[in-house]
Amino acid sequence: MQSLNVELKRLVEISSLSRNGTSEVVNHLAQLMEDVGLHVEPQHVMHSLEGVSKRQFNVVGVLGEPLVDEMTKTGLLLQSHLDTGLDPKQIKLNNDDAGAVYGAGVSDSKGDFLAKLFAVKRFREKKLKMPIYLVGTCGAELGQFGARYLIQSKILNPQYVMVGYPTDLRMGVEQRSLLNFDISIVYRVTERDPRGFNRGVKINIKSSMGSAFEGSNKPDALTVALALIKDSVQAGFDLRIKFINSNSDMLSLSTDCFLELYLTSHQFEDFKRLLKQEEFTKKYNGLVSLDYEFLIVGDAGVSFIPHDGTLAMYRLFDELKLRLNEDVENSVSNFYYINQEINSTRFGLAVAYSSALSDKIVCTALADAIARISNQFPAMNINIQKTISIPGLESNDSEIKLILKESIEKESVSCEELKTSGINESGIFSRAGFDTVFFGAGGMDSNPRSDKENISIEQLDRSVEIYSKIIERVCM
């Protein structure tokens, strides 16, 4: 292998979008792992998710003699996820920043995986009393199904687990739980070419990329689109929506929302003034922009969401936010997709909340919100379905925390504890009975899940030293 930063630049050029699979990046890493002496087995991860490639793989590397016994935990598992929310082409490279590497997943968590590999390399010729397991997983952006599959396969039974996550070299001891929901508003009929609504506008709202649950209070495109609809209705515009669409992953902010709506000709000029780019951009501090195209209805006519469907859409959005803020203390919510279908509007909602709370509190708050809006719009059928549950990590005293603390301090780094609102795999491993902590170079200043994602080479090098000290303490 070449230097860490050279290998990392190569690694982040390989696309591993969550929905497209990890086969290419796993093949690349498997060769590197074999070159430093690990026994390597790619693990094909089976799933039933719609619209997601079947080319999903974990990569499992072992140094030392593994003991796989359900009754005996042994060895150190170093885990990082390899999938990303962005494609390498979406990243804005900064060639003037010689102290950092830029790329999709460079801080969360491809850089961490390579740091662990470079640390493991130092022990290839040494006799280990406990095995080292180096694992890269898939599906982190889609419910962490790669880590779940690894645990369920029972091919490893480690004593300790270190999950890769950008903590700025702090010791990660607590993270929130997360619930994901699919919500639908179903209406019986659409309005077909109502008289007078013959002027249209296609709007594309764009916002900054970023993590939905940590280090970001930035407006997202979907929230802004619904606010635009609400403000327009409350300002007296009688509008009809033909189409609304936005797609993102549950851990990332919505960055694009496409909206097509129609008005009567006598209100159209006033509405055009509402869309002035300068005023709209200023309202959101330059973090949101929009492009638009004006339309005239032809002879074919247009089908619209019924007017009550439009009202129910943004009122439900507001009510869900309100109930979560009031009933679920310190929760963070992310509306990350909305799709318009023939007779329904569907959207996704992810909620992060304290791991000390029961998920029933979240579900009750959402059910209450839906009941309130359903009473206002009895002709609408509003449904909610929980699709994904990710357990959080609760802070506790453990051996791996003590080992990590001592290793950090030996590297002359102040050992600070981190309680994050971000989401990683530590809760899944802890819930499965493993002594778990999360740690890694980079932090929210590294802009994970954004087009400016980067990682400090100095921090990455220091993380290699810390991982080496942990391996020496646990496995030698």
Image (cartoon, grey):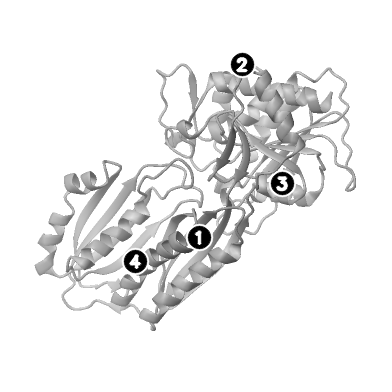
Residue 3 in sight here = yes
Whether pointer 1 and pointer 4 mark residues with C-beta atoms closer than 8 Å, the reply is: no
Q: Which image quarter: residue 347?
A: bottom left
Tag in front: 4 or 2? 4
What is the distance, in whole Å, between disc 4 and disc 3 at their CAs? 38 Å
Whether pointer 2 and pointer 3 mark residues with C-beta atoms closer than 8 Å, the reply is: no
Disc with the residue nearer the chain's start (3 vs 1): 1
Q: Residue at x 29, y 59 (%)?
A: 227
Say if 359 sits above or below 85 in the image.
Answer: below
The residue pinned by badge 2 equals 3
Disc with the residue nearer the chain's start (2 vs 1): 2
The residue pinned by badge 4 equals 314
Q: Amino acid at mark 1?
A: Val
Q: Residue at x 74, y 47 (%)?
A: 150
Whether pointer 4 and pointer 2 mark residues with C-beta atoms closer than 8 Å, the reply is: no
Dot 3, crowdedness within 10 Å: few (<14), some or many (≥20)? many
The residue pinned by badge 3 equals 429
Is 237 situated left or right of 334 in this image?
A: left
What is the distance, in whole Å, between disc 1 and disc 4 at their CAs? 21 Å
The residue pinned by badge 1 equals 328
Tag in front: 1 or 4? 1
What is the distance, in whole Å, between disc 2 and disc 1 at their CAs? 47 Å
Q: Which image quarter: residue 134?
A: top right
What is the distance, in whole Å, between disc 3 and disc 1 at their CAs? 25 Å
Tag in front: 2 or 3? 3
- Camera-nearest residue between 51 and 82: 82
Name the secondary structure under disc 2. Answer: loop
- What number is the disc on residue 409? none
Q: Position of residue 466 (x, y in %)?
A: 67, 23
Q: Position of residue 471 (x, y in %)?
A: 76, 25
